[in-house]
């Protein structure tokens, strides 16, 4: 029987001397998730000291909020940090990242097939940002939802994009970065929406909004959103890199066998329950200290999460999405299986549980 490491894994880490860090990460967070007053999509949140910092698109610009808790972000003043003075087009899903002493905001901008990734940076989270620079991602194809992380000393950029110049499907790609603003080498596909449970709603079928996190054994995960964001089938799923695996090799990644956070019981991975209060939860943000995956939580307690969703009883539409506070924890001894591809058919390790 699978045991919940939400409850049983903490004791060993307490003995290892991490209780103070655990309490620091969780003390400001509510015990239950909840709908915030922020009617918006695509949250990106990190914690620096005791301050929670979020970023969001504001039509033709980008705004930053700061608050002493995730729940307080909705009522915090929005400070405009960038405006689309060059009329780049639609501004989507900004992601705030801290790398060293600087803040970087990555965002997609463009119209139709012209969407590409851009970046701005500053020494302060809410002012002084540089002009936007287009990221020179390999192959220069349509790209959205990009974010930077560092794993085993190497910077990586992961995003959602097209293989070619037409909207056939949205895949997840990864590339090395030689600096926070400079991709190097090729792009590598790590996930395509080919499983039945991530093809319930399509035209195109979608993998998007990837977010990196490191599990208690040090293995890399990319948690992403599947199915169309315009439907209540939107959900979160997991990619887990095999132990010692190469992040650029697609068959070193093992995909969860269903949604891990969603509102349709038919698409959920066995042992994972659908949401009770929201429809279509997705495009999440792990609220990590400094946004650094090396501060990913240990096994044991729940940790803060932000995601967008539509409250049950409300028509599912983009304009009805709200930011929600939630929590997540690690769930041990979970097997992901696959067939008819290179490498072992199964991989067992940590997965994640998400809570409204």
Image (spheres, rainbow, N blue to C red):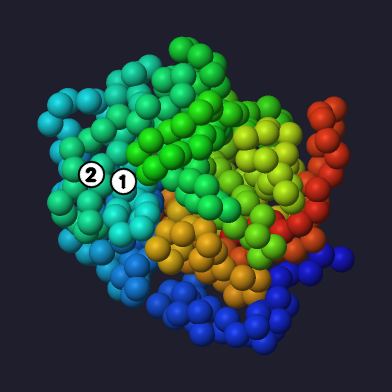
Looking at this view, is 10 or 30 the one in front?
10
Residue bearing the label numbered 1 = 105
Looking at the rendering, which quadrant does residue 142 occupy? top left
Q: Would you say the residues marked 2 and 1 are in contact, meaning their CB atoms lie under 8 Å apart? A: yes
Q: Secondary structure at mark 2?
A: strand
Crowding around mark 2 (Cα neighbors within 10 Å: few <14, some 14 to 19, many 20+) is many
User: In this figure, which residue is indicated by the disc labeled 2?
Assistant: 62
- From this viewpoint, is residue 72 visible? no
Compared across the picture, whether 233 is left or right of 219 comes to: left
> Which quarter of the figure has residue 113?
top left
Q: Report which quarter residue 306 is drawn in.
A: bottom left
Q: Closer to the observer: label 2 or label 1?
A: 1
Number of marks present in the image shown: 2
SS under mark 1 = strand
Q: Name the outermost residue toward the top.
A: 165
Residue 144 place in picture, x, y as percent: 41, 32
Q: Residue at x 51, y 14 (%)?
A: 164
* Residue 340 in view: yes
Position of 264 compared to 73: left or right?
Answer: right
- Can you say whether 71 is above or below 7 in the image? above
Residue 129: give x, y in percent of width and height. 19, 47
Residue located 68% across and 47% down the image: 240
């Amino acid at each position: 029987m699978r045991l919940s490491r939400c409850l049983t894994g903490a004791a060993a880490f307490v003995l290892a001397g991490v209780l103070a860090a655990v309490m620091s990460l969780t003390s400001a967070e509510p015990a239950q998730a909840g709908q915030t007053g922020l009617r918006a999509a695509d949250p990106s949140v990190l914690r620096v000291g005791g301050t929670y910092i979020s970023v969001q698109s504001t039509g033709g610009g980008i705004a930053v909020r700061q608050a002493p808790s995730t729940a307080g972000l909705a009522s915090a003043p929005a400070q405009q940090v960038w405006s689309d003075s060059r009329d780049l087009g639609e501004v989507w899903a900004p992601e705030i990242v801290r790398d060293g002493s600087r803040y970087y905001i990555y965002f997609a901008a463009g119209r139709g097939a012209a969407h590409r990734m851009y970046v701005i940076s500053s020494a302060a989270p809410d002012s002084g940002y540089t002009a936007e620079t287009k990221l020179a991602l390999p192959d220069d194809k349509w790209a959205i939802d990009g974010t930077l992380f560092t794993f085993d000393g190497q910077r990586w950029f992961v995003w959602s994009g097209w293989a070619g110049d037409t909207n056939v499907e949205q895949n997840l790609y990864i590339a090395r970065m030689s600096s926070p603003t400079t991709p190097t080498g090729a792009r590598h596909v790590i996930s395509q929406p080919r499983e039945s449970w991530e093809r319930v709603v399509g035209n195109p079928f979608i993998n998007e909004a990837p977010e990196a996190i490191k599990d208690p054994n040090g293995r890399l995960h990319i948690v992403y959103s599947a199915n169309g964001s315009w439907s209540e089938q939107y959900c979160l799923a997991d990619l887990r890199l095999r132990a010692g695996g190469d992040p650029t090799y697609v068959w070193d990644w093992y995909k969860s066998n269903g949604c891990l956070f969603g509102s349709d019981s038919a698409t959920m991975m066995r042992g994972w329950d659908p949401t009770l209060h929201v429809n279509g939860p997705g495009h999440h943000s792990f609220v990590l200290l400094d946004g650094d995956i090396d501060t990913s939580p240990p096994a044991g307690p729940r940790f803060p999460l932000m995601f967008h969703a539509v409250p049950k009883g409300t028509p599912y539409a983009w304009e009805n999405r709200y930011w929600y506070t939630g929590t997540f924890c690690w769930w041990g001894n979970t097997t992901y299986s696959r067939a008819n591809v290179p490498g072992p058919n199964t991989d067992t390790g940590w997965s994640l549980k998400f809570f409204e």
